[in-house]
Image (spheres, rainbow, N blue to C red):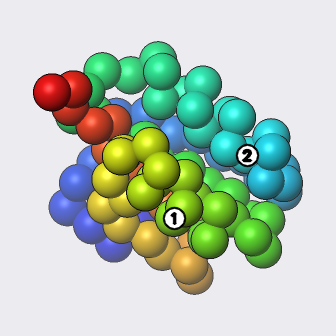
Amino acid sequence: MDTTTRPDCTLDLGEKGCSHLLQDITTAMNKITAGQTLLVIAHDPAAPLDIKVWSRQTGNPLLHVSLANNQFLLQKRFSC
């Protein structure tokens, strides 16, 4: 991954599709604390758009995307 932020956790989803992909990301995000990061590796062709939309809907920032490596770095949002 081409970033200075090192992930706190990694979730390799392989070829999982949208419903399982987003469910697994949500489950993994629930296991980390606010401010921590999750590196998602997803090879599903719809993953880039699905993860981007999920990020916006949940308020968990998408910090970095590497389409060449199918990697997405998310950060768990801080509660107000």
Q: Position of residue 54 (x, y in %)?
A: 54, 52
Residue lying at the far left in this picture: please name it: 80
The quarter of the rendered structure image containing the N terminus is bottom left
Give the residue at x 36% y 45%: 60
Q: Position of residue 21 (x, y in %)?
A: 73, 46
Disc 1 crowd rating (10 Å Cα; few below 14, some 14-19, many 20+) is some
- Residue linked to disc 1: 52
Disc 2 crowd rating (10 Å Cα; few below 14, some 14-19, many 20+) is many
- Quarter-of-image position of residue 68: bottom right
Left or right: 3, with 41 as reference point: left
Give the residue at x 47% y 30%: 29
The kind of residue on which mark 2 rests is Leu
Check the image and report above or below for 48 versus 32.
Answer: below
Q: Nearer the viewer, residue 59 or 66?
A: 59
Mark 1 to mark 2 CA distance (whole Å): 12 Å
Left or right: 61, with 26 as reference point: left
Give the residue at x 58% y 32%: 26
Q: Position of residue 52 (x, y in %)?
A: 51, 64
- The answer to whether one can see residue 73 in this image is no
The kind of residue on which mark 1 rests is Lys
For numbered disc 2, what is the local secondary structure?
helix
- Residue linked to disc 2: 21
Q: Position of residue 45 (x, y in %)?
A: 78, 74
